[in-house]
Each structure stands twice: as structure tokens, then as C-alpha cells.
Amino acid sequence: MSASNPVSVGPISGSTKVYRDLPDGGRVPFRRVQLSNGEHLDLYDTSGPYTDPDATIDLDAGLPHRPVTTDRGTQLQRARAGEITAEMAFIAEREGVATELVRSEVARGRAVIPANHNHPESEPMIIGTPSSRAASSMCSRSCVCQASGLVEVSVPSGTGPTSSLPESAAM
């Protein structure tokens, strides 16, 4: 951090930031870690532009925008209409699954994308079936998720943070 820029910026030690390009011009960030055997491992990277050595950070201008779906249809409505949105494509690339899987799980109501087109600086995420990330299992403790039937348990039965829930709360 410097006096002129009060935000921590720069690469994370032991890794590099890499991107996978999407057809709509979007880019999905990953954190690449070089392994001792010469191979690499790409990890989920949600650090934003702050760890990109090529990024220009301007706190007054805000974060760079990404392609978003800007009409008034929700992700659920678009998924049920058979459309794959920019957010669904981003999530599919990040999660390493087919875009059609993301669309179909959202359409069925087994996954949600809490994306708001009024906040294009945020990175899309998914909560539910196609996600292999912790947000899925953390959702099971949320009263909102339980009430709406969006409870998702992504850990083996009898283990993890949902093991103390009654069977009726875990799907």
C-alpha cells in the first residue's frame, strides 16, 4: 500500500493471475500455481483486478465492467426460456462445467445466480447443484435458502457443516 493508493495491489506470491476468454468478450480469472513436478493448478480467483499486474487501479473510476445481461428478465426467466446469459457462461467456465448444465439447473430451480445487472463490477456466482464451491454447503444454514427450498448439500452425508441439520432441511 502506498500513500497515493490506499488499496493493496500486486500479484500474490507463489502464483500468477491468468484468464480464460469467453465468446462475449468476458474473461474469467484464475490463480495459476506452478507445481514442483512442472505442471500447474488453476484455482478459483476472486481477487478482482487488484492482483493483476497489468491493471490500472483508479478508486475514483471504480472497477472495470464486465459483459452483463441488461434487460429486466431474471436469470431464472432467461434460463427457463432456454437462454444462456453472460453470467451463466462466466459461471460455467469458472466451475468447469457445461453452460447448458448451469442453465438447466437454474431453470429447474436447483441453483440460483444472485447476479444484479445494476452491479456489473461483481463477479457472477452460483449457489446450488453445479457448484463445487463452499457457498453451496453454506447455503444450507441460511433461513432464506431453507424457506425457498434452495438447500444444497455438497458434502458426503453425515459430514461437514450440514450434518447437524434435521433430515427434512437437507436435500
Image: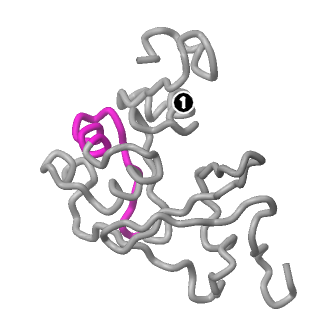
SS of the residue under disc 1: helix
Position of 118 relative to 53 (above/below): above
On screen, residue 16 versus residue 152, left or right, reads: right
On screen, residue 8 versus residue 57, left or right, reads: right
Give coordinates of residue 37: x percent, y percent: 73, 46
Residue that label 1 marks: 137
Q: Quadrant of residue 49?
A: bottom right
Quadrant for the N terminus in the image: bottom right
Quadrant for the C terminus in the image: top left
Position of 7 relative to 151 (above/below): below
Tell me which colouring the rendered structure shows: one colour
Give coordinates of residue 30: x percent, y percent: 58, 58
Q: Residue at x 64, y 86 (%)?
A: 56
The amino acid type of the residue labelled 1 equals Ser
Q: Viewer-proximal residue, 144 or 48? A: 48
Q: Is residue 137 magenta?
A: no
Q: Residue at x 62, y 15 (%)?
A: 159
Q: As drawn, which residue projects farthest toward the left?
A: 81
Q: Viewer-proximal residue, 18 or 58? A: 18
Position of 138 relative to 89 (above/below): above
First to last magenta residue range? 101-118
Q: Residue at x 38, y 31 (%)?
A: 150
